[in-house]
Amino acid sequence: MCGVVGVYSSNPSLSSRIAYYSLFSLQHRGQESAGMVVSSKDHVYIHKGMGLVSEVFDEEILDRMNGSVAVGHVRYSTTGESRLENAQPLHVKTARGHVSIAHNGNLVNYWELRKGLEKEGRVFLTDSDTEVIAQLLSNLMLDGDYFEALKKLNDILVGSYTLALSIDDVLIGYRDPLGFKPLCVGESDEGVVIASESCALDAVGARFVRDVEPGEAVIVKDGEVEFVRIAESPKRSFCVFEYIYFARPDSIIDGRSVYDVRYNIGRILYREAPVEADIISPVPDSGTTSSLGFAYESGIRYLEALIKNRYVGRTFIMPEQRLREFSVHLKMNAIKENVKSKRVVLIDDSIVRGTTSRKIVDMVRNAGAREVHFRVGSPPIVSPCYFGIDMSTREELIASRKSVEEIRREINADSLAYLSIDGLLEAVGFKREDLCLACLTGVYPVPIPGERCC
């Protein structure tokens, strides 16, 4: 639940600005903190802060950050508290040079690795798993170049780790061998951009080159781009929730249009769970594209029942349940004229805890709806995510302890239906073995203590 950016530009005054606009377009991936490190052969400039990209940076700050290489990050915490010390990129000075790391993912063996490093006398300044990567990488680079260091790093780390990093004025992007989290590369007249999603390339006028493959690194040195195979990838485990919820609809990830996937989800959802109704409405904004597909397939009118206050952040990535619940009423309001005496179908991307869904259903009922039906563009979430999306504990996941009918009663809907796993696979267009479906099946692609694997 983070976004990473790497920029190379032969114009030192442009790198920070290209990174800024790239980060701005990835704001949906993390709203807790933002940061950037800009480096050249001689200087390193670091700036990080809590809050949105536009709150952390201004013209004066960007003017000071001159260098050929920039690494940037927007954060939502999954390992480590939400505080300034954990804001990224993390920067360390090593015998091989200045290293800055921005990380999207989550290390399953973080505590084991950290304890081992602490026994060796290493001192940690954060409680982020990214610092473990920084400590290991700085040590591994003593014995060889960064190619060998990344290879050895793969033998140590367990989990998901997509990285944008710089070593002095060399820019590197790397994606773990299972490819949990996305990473792509673009080029423009101004330079090279590495980013979590292609929408960040579009924002700065960069031409999409290609995705970084699982187990592959992209090296940018003096403007020259090289793709290097670091680790073999016997299988892939793309995070399916990138397509269901997390990525921006205008992004293309691993060859799939996120918009098309979500539109197909809506069409398939109607085929699997038809309903008689007067209007189809999204739960804004994550249900919008699937609602259009549902309306097209059903022939039922698309009409918004809810309007979003766009100055309130996404409830799913607010770190405390109390804040999530309170923010629902700040975040959206029902349009009484559109729902009065009507049978309304609400489309959402998922149900995690159920509390927000109940409040939304009640809001539409109180606005005068005759019936409120709920359709979900994913299968039930039954297991926590250990790879970088905050899916709560199993006890907090409503679908892990209640049947669909029990959830329907819990959220006060007249009917409730979820997309099937087969329907989801059809919509995404990948084979089952190419996706991480652990949160939907309870079967994890890497060993997790106490969980089913593979």
Image (spheres, rainbow, N blue to C red):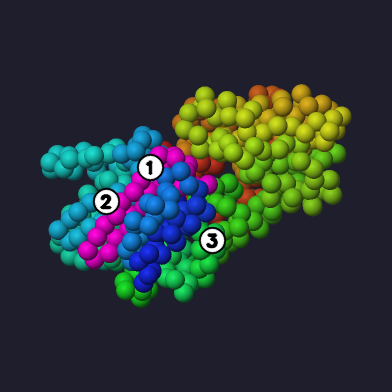
Q: Is residue 385 magenta?
A: no
Distance, label 1 to label 2, CA atoms, is 14 Å
Q: Earlier in the sequence, mark 1 or mark 3?
A: 1
Nearest the camera: 173 or 392?
Answer: 173
Name the residue: 67% across, 41% down: 284
Give the side of residue 143 with respect to residue 410, left or right.
Answer: left
| Residue where numbered disc 1 is placed | 49
Question: From where the camera sits, is residue 344 visible?
Answer: yes
- Nearest-to-viewer mark from 1 and 2: 1
Distance, label 1 to label 3, CA atoms, is 22 Å
Q: Residue 405 location, x and y as percent? A: 68, 28
User: Is 110 drawn above or below residue 69 in the view shown?
Assistant: above
Q: Please, what is the three-letter code of the amino acid marked with disc 2?
A: His
Number of other residues with Cα within 10 Å of mark 3, as a class: few under 14, some 14 to 19, many 20 or more:
some
| Magenta stretch in the rendered image | 28-53
Report helix, strand or loop for mark 2: strand
Q: Please, what is the three-letter code of the amino acid marked with disc 1?
A: Gly
| Residue where numbered disc 2 is placed | 91
Distance, label 2 to label 3, CA atoms, is 26 Å
Q: Please, what is the three-letter code of the amino acid marked with disc 3?
A: Ala
View extreme (left): residue:
121
Report helix, strand or loop for mark 3: helix
Name the residue: 24% across, 60% down: 43
Q: Residue 332 location, x and y as percent? A: 67, 33
Name the residue: 82% across, 48% down: 298
Give the side of residue 122 with respect to residue 111, left or right.
Answer: left
Number of other residues with Cα within 10 Å of mark 2, as a class: few under 14, some 14 to 19, many 20 or more:
many
| Residue where numbered disc 3 is placed | 203
Q: Residue 178 location, x and y as percent? A: 41, 56
Q: Quadrant of residue 71 in the image? A: bottom left
Report helix, strand or loop for mark 1: strand
